[in-house]
């Protein structure tokens, strides 16, 4: 188990989350309220946002893994709190300056290690992660239509872009439980493993990513997400080249990557400045 160097900025002090450092440059974020199936209150969403913003700004961290404790990854929004919010001024989950993890763009990769049920906002969160490892017993669902609701965390557009209209309709309009194997067949899960291996498998992916140039990873990821979220391929590419690749070209890691290859040695990366 690695530890965060002492000279860096300390992380927020979480109540809902548990933070650890299982490998060099890797952050493990564990949702740890199993008695409520790791359901997401407004305070929980604010805490996740704070930790992910800190992760994006922390130069020693290149990759993060998100998982849950107990039977659930997360059962989604706290419906009791959501119902109460219907009579208030603010929609559930939305506070000024807070970015829901289901709509996070962020800077650095987030790998989901889905240990159990991922319902509602939990399923939306998974769909928005960069890579997904799921336990073979994990169950996914967007049951909002069965509760008089509709998914509000950005999943509708992302599902259509990822799996197409008809599969998206099956997932959203039926609200039925979906196995990890089905999610894998649709391209929404990268790998399915036994539950006891789910975090270790996610860590293998994270270590592969963390071994690469952090500038290259950030830059390439932003290009992928820009393509995912826009329809115009050429405009997305032009915007990405101007906004991200132009910064990469000026950084130290691009020079280190080329020099280490030519000199036949292992590269020594610095935290991303992108």
Image (cartoon, grey):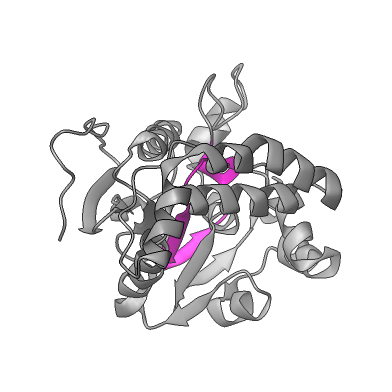
Compare residues 9 and 85 and report the one nearer the observer: 9
* Region rendered in magenta: 100-120
Compare residues 137 and 154 and report the one nearer the observer: 154
Picture residue at 76% right of the left edge, 50% below the top: 157
Q: Position of residue 101 (x, y in %)?
A: 51, 42
Picture residue at 61% right of the left edge, 16% below the top: 89
Residue 271 drawn above or below residue 34: above
Q: Is residue 245 left or right of residue 55?
A: right
Compare residues 162 and 268 and report the one nearer the observer: 268
Give yes or no for residue 112 being in the magenta stretch: yes
Q: Position of residue 124 (x, y in %)?
A: 59, 53
Picture residue at 57% right of the left edge, 34% below the top: 83
Q: Position of residue 198 (x, y in %)?
A: 36, 73
Q: Position of residue 216 (x, y in %)?
A: 51, 52
Farthest-out residue, top? 89
| Residue 136 in view (yes/no) | no
| Residue 107 in view (yes/no) | yes
Q: Is residue 256 left or right of residue 98?
A: left
- Quadrant into which the N terminus falls: bottom left
Picture residue at 42% right of the left edge, 48% below the top: 253
């Amino acid at each position: 188990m690695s530890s965060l160097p002492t000279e860096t900025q300390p992380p927020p002090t979480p109540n809902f989350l548990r933070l650890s450092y299982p490998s060099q440059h890797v952050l493990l974020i564990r949702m740890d309220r199993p008695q409520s199936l790791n359901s997401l209150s407004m305070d929980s969403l604010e805490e996740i946002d704070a930790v992910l913003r800190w992760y994006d700004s922390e130069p020693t961290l290149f990759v993060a893994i998100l998982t849950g404790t107990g039977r659930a990854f997360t059962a989604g929004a706290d419906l009791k709190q959501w119902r109460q919010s219907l009579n208030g001024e603010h929609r559930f989950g939305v506070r000024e300056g807070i970015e829901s993890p289901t709509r996070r763009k962020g800077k650095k990769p987030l790998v989901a290690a889905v240990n159990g049920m991922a319902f509602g906002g939990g399923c939306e969160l998974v769909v928005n992660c960069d890579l997904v490892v799921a336990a073979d017993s994990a169950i996914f669902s967007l049951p909002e239509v069965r509760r008089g609701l509709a998914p509000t965390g950005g999943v509708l557009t992302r599902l259509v872009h990822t799996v197409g209209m008809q599969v998206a309709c099956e997932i959203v309009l039926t609200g039925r439980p979906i196995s990890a194997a089905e999610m894998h067949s649709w391209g929404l899960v990268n790998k399915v493993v036994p539950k006891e291996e789910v975090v270790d498998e996610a860590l293998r992916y994270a270590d592969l990513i963390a071994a690469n140039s952090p500038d290259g990873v950030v830059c390439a990821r932003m290009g992928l997400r820009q393509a995912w979220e826009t329809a115009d391929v050429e405009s997305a590419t032009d915007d990405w080249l101007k906004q991200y690749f132009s910064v990469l070209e000026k950084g130290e890691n691009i020079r280190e990557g080329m020099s280490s290859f030519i000199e036949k040695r292992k590269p020594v990366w610095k935290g991303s400045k992108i």
